[in-house]
Image (cartoon, rainbow, N blue to C red):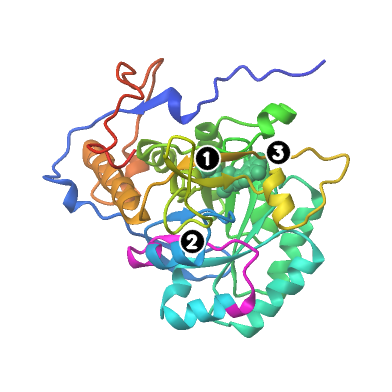
């Protein structure tokens, strides 16, 4: 008989963070930087641990430049060539601390990683990304990359359960990417019925990783700055964003106009039909496309959105009395709620008076 786990598992929308008495005077006093030392690479990191996702339209060179200016991180998508990454490193000295190169999980990917790493020894991070991080094959791939490139800090995923986080860390991952199905353009949950509520996944996986001196990324499911605060509050070391960064000048793709003159950009999942067509990857007969393509309202420079995100996060820290982002999770008590926002004027925001959503 199938087993049922009766513990309630939580998504960001199911909780709020309880405020606590604090001595902080203003949110300006909050420091969002975090220092980490990674388990295998032994590399030291110091930055604001928010990552632009390694998706075509978000993990761009332009995003990396803007994000780096504020000490945020970008996982470049895997379709950039060595020359493009080389010119980025040349153009923006020091950016290597805030970028990862990405790879899938095949032998060709390993060869490409090795070439990039040999040609560009400044590269410090690799993001090994597969839709399903549960295969023995992927664990073995992580082991091979660790052996071949011992100095790299390896991000690997995606998984959502503690035992698999441990297995990937023991195989050589420094940072495990957590999230199956929460993404804004992901259709895994509807296509397969598989997934895990993101906040519970983060809390359980962070616990498993931290026990081994590993780290985790909460990947997917953040749609407002408060969700990012909840992910950090739940124990995430990094938070990765796709949809929240789509539709900006730094996102790939043209600005288009719809029938009513509203400007938009196209945003799509990395296993959507759009991505498959673009990269001429064949969708095998037995595999469903688990991503969709959407129109995102054009939102101008990402700088404004970034400020909104960092402002929200600083304010969350102030509400619980956390002078550094590090203390946010220690000072977080989640309260389960049935309604987290007042919906009275939903959709009626004045676009001119509310430039950032
Ligand atoms: P978002 O921040 O948009 O909610 O989530 C971004 C994350 O969604 C990405 O980092 C990646 O893990 C996941 N993702 C991106 N494209 C796809 C896709 O086509 N299918 C699925 N299942 N997940 C995707």
Span of residues in magenta: 67-83
Q: Secondary structure at mark 1?
A: strand
Residue lying at 56% horizontally and 42% vertically, measured from the top left: 205
* Horizontal arrangement in the rendering, residue 87 relative to residue 46 (left or right): right
* In the image, farthest residue toward the right: 285
User: Label 3: which residue?
Assistant: 290
User: Label 2: which residue?
Assistant: 74
User: Which residue occupies the foreground of this view, 268 or 76?
Assistant: 268
x, y percent for residue 190: 68, 27
Q: CA distance from mark 3 to mark 1?
A: 17 Å
* Horizontal arrangement in the rendering, residue 226 relative to residue 166 (left or right): left
User: Would residue 208 be seen by someone viewing this image from the given angle?
Assistant: no
Residue 118 is tagged as: none
Q: Is mark 3 within 8 Å of ligand 1?
A: yes
User: Which residue occupies the foreground of this view, 297 or 229?
Assistant: 297
* In the image, farthest residue toward the left: 25
């Amino acid at each position: 008989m199938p087993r049922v786990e009766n513990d309630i598992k939580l998504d960001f929308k199911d909780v709020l963070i309880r405020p606590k008495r604090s001595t902080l005077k203003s949110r300006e006093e909050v420091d969002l930087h975090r220092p980490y030392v990674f388990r295998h690479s032994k590399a030291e990191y110091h930055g604001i641990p928010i990552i632009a996702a390694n998706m075509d339209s978000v993990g761009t060179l332009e995003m990396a430049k803007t994000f780096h200016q504020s000490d945020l991180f970008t996982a470049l998508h895997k379709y950039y060539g060595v020359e493009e990454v080389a010119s980025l490193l040349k153009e923006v000295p020091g950016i290597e601390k805030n970028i990862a190169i990405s790879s899938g999980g095949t032998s060709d990917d390993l060869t490409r990683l090795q070439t990039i790493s040999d040609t560009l020894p400044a590269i410090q991070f690799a993001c090994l990304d597969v839709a399903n991080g549960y295969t023995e094959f992927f664990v073995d791939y992580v082991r091979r990359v660790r052996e071949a490139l011992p100095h790299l800090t390896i991000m690997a995923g995606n998984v959502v359960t503690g035992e698999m986080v441990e297995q990937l860390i023991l195989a050589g991952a420094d940072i495990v990417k957590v999230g199956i199905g929460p993404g804004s353009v992901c259709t895994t949950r509807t296509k397969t019925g598989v997934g895990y509520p993101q906040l519970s996944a983060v809390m359980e996986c962070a616990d498993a990783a931290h026990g081994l001196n590993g780290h985790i990324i909460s990947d997917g499911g953040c749609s407002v700055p408060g969700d990012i605060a909840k992910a950090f509050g739940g124990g995430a070391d990094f938070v990765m964003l796709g949809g929240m960064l789509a539709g900006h000048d730094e996102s790939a793709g043209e600005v288009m106009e719809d029938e009513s003159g509203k400007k938009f950009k196209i945003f799509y999942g990395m296993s959507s039909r759009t991505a498959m067509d673009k990269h001429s990857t064949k969708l095998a007969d037995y595999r469903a496309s688990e991503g969709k393509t959407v129109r995102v309202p054009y939102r101008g420079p990402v700088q404004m959105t970034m400020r909104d995100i960092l402002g929200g996060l600083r304010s969350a820290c102030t509400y619980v009395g956390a002078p550094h982002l590090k203390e946010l999770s220690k000072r977080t008590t989640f309260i389960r709620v049935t309604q987290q926002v007042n919906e009275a004027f939903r959709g009626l925001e004045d676009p001119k008076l509310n430039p950032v959503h």
